[in-house]
Amino acid sequence: MEIGLVGKPNVGKSTFFNAITLASAEVADYPFTTIAHNQGVGYVRQPCPCKELGVKCSPRNSLCLDGVRMIPIGVVDVAGLVPGAHKGRGLGNQFLDSLRRAEVLIHVVDVSGSTDPEGVACEPGSNDPLEDLRFLEEEIELWLDGILDRDWERLTRLSKVEKRGNDVLLAEKLAGVGGGLQVVREVLRETGLSDKKLFEWSESDRLRFSRVFRRVTKPIVVAANMVDKPGAEKHVRRVLDRVGNRGWATCAVAELALRRAAEKGLIRYTPGDSSFEVLDRSKLKEEQLQGLERIRKILDRFGSTGVQKVVDTAVFDVLGKVVVYPVENENKYCDHEGRVLPDAFIMEKGSTARDLAYKIHTEIGEAFIHAIDAKTKQRVGEDYELRMNDVIKIVTAAR
């Protein structure tokens, strides 16, 4: 799966990307530092079942950090968007197009209000980040509307002469941006446009469809970033009140500093923790120690840097994904090579035991007989709905 990082220029988006991927995207205090989208691997965080089961795990496709399983996901960092981006302003449509595969978007917002709508530095607190929230949603909706607009004449002509309904025609057109048939039907029902032929739609009908389609296929979680900067106090609560449980106060620069210090063995820190431990003060310069103390104050105030919370919220709370551990031996929780809890799979909301079998391999899905919940040792059927942190053995027919 893939998440997309979006926002106007100069709001700490590349720093946020670096913090969750430990990559080295260019970071600078001027607009359009990112002139081509960056792609990397980030991680979501869940308690590893090893603690609950009393075993020592042998991760293969993920990491286990003292009982915390970090599972990889794709991340794309898009060049900063400015008002009018859907028409090609700034770096334009080519970068909006790079969001096609993203299932959820993280909007990095400068809550210090120190960058204007174009991403140019301004007096701290003077820009209203609530306007940034509005414009970005609008830009993505207009980009989606533009995808339809470019082919609208053909679509309306087909709707007059063919028996295929709106759902089929629109699903074919929007397949590249997450518009499967069931999704399109859901949006048509919500907008009340199911029975209105495409050639009867007004521009406002199409835009209404695009708005709901964006909300369903490209939901947004907000990283209220730069909480350490002057001016943030004025706006951070307003932003979080506006987005509710789909946003967190964040300090990407602090998260990046902690992850790099941990990577070098200077501190003990797991992404998303509320604290860190300095391992050897003698290896750190005085200014580094002072910097860490400033970061500690941020953790004390907000509970964490917020960066990992935003990513986890996007994947688990908004998309409803679950993490499942397939095993071949339900008693030892291992695969055929003896590796304990080797793989952590991120599964869609509502996925079943048979879906997991197909995820492992097509032949396993086709030979599926039943599954076993390794935690309870109970047999479950093909329609068993997977739950977070399930450990599952798939039983297949002999081939």
Image (cartoon, grey):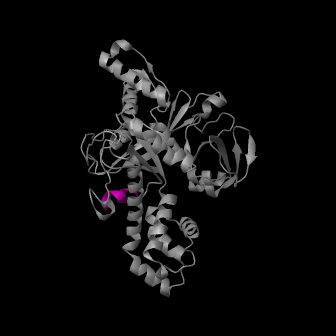
Please provide percent x and percent y for residue 52: 65, 30
Specify the farthest residue to the right.
Answer: 378
Specify the farthest residue to the left.
Answer: 30
Determine the image quadrant of residue 108. top left
Position of the C terminus by quadrant: bottom right
Left or right placement of residue 195 versus residue 123 in this view: right
Say whether residue 251 is visible: no
Secondary structure mostly seen in the magenta stretch: helix
Say whether residue 36 is visible: yes
Q: Nearer the viewer, residue 86 or 235?
A: 235
Please provide percent x and percent y for residue 133: 41, 51
Please provide percent x and percent y for residue 100: 41, 59
Q: Which residues are magenta?
A: 93-99
Left or right placement of residue 176 versus residue 184 in this view: left
Measured along the vertical axis of the image, is residue 210 above or below residue 235?
Answer: below
Measured along the vertical axis of the image, is residue 371 above or below residue 362?
Answer: above
Measured along the vertical axis of the image, is residue 224 above or below residue 172?
Answer: above
Numbered label tally: 0
Measured along the vertical axis of the image, is residue 301 above or below residue 71?
Answer: above
Q: Nearer the viewer, residue 387 or 308?
A: 308
Q: Nearer the viewer, residue 352 or 308?
A: 308
Q: Is-magenta flag for residue 98?
A: yes
Point 73% across, 38% down: residue:
376
Please provide percent x and percent y for residue 103: 48, 54
Q: Is-magenta flag for residue 339?
A: no
Specify the farthest residue to the top.
Answer: 282
Q: Nearer the viewer, residue 108 or 331?
A: 108
